[in-house]
Image (spheres, rainbow, N blue to C red):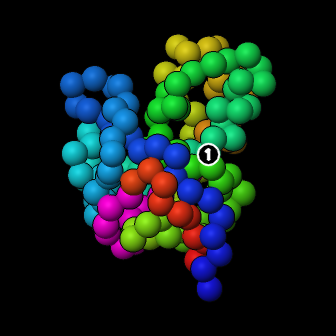
Amino acid sequence: MRQEVGEVLAVFTSQKANSQRIEEKCLELDSKGILGDKFYAKDMQRSVLLTSLESYALALQEGIEMPNGALGENILIDYNPYALAVGSQIAIGEVVVEITQNCTICNHLSFIDKRLPTLLKDDRGVFVKVIKSGFIEKGNKLYLL
């Protein structure tokens, strides 16, 4: 049973030359992560970060403005997956991903604002591994499986 829950708002990669996120038109994913991303084939349990727009809204409520991609996400969605259990699967376009863990807070967030690590402790994102390879782009629908 597939339940539509939202859609992709933006997709990003990290480049090896710097830690900046680059907004892309499309991502290609396989079992090792996102092709062309600096984390590709490094740790398949943590190579793809899914973040909800809600994380940016939480920060904005505290007066912290930041551009999409600033939280280090690869896929920004308009659905909050943070309460889903590890092992939950989500179909995004033709890709299927499985939640492996909640994202831990990285120290680099304090460079944006010192309050961010505490504020987004449980609400920064979820790491997923790729179960079914394919392409993801802005506008793709999300389905809980």
What kind of element bears circle 1? Answer: strand
- The residue shown at (38%, 40%) is 12
Classify the position of the C terminus by image quarter. bottom right
Q: Which residues are magenta?
A: 126-136
**How would you rate the neighbour count of disc 1 (Cα within 10 Å): few for under 14, some for 14-19, many for 20 or more?**
many
Q: Main secondary structure of the magenta part?
A: strand
Residue 80 at x, y percent in the picture: 68, 52
The residue beneath circle 1 is 52
Residue 76 at x, y percent in the picture: 52, 45
Q: Residue furthest bottom?
A: 1
Query: What amino acid is labelled 1 in the image?
Result: Ser
- The residue shown at (37%, 36%) is 23
Residue 27 versus residue 15 in the image, above or below? below
Q: Residue furthest front?
A: 139
The image quarter containing residue 11 is top left
Residue 112 versus residue 144 in the image, above or below? above
Residue 60 at x, y percent in the picture: 71, 24
Q: Is residue 118 visible?
A: no
Q: Is residue 108 visible?
A: yes
Residue 81 versus residue 124 in the image, above or below? below
The image quarter containing residue 131 is bottom left
Question: Magenta span has 56?
Answer: no
> Is 144 on the left-hand or right-hand side of 12?
right
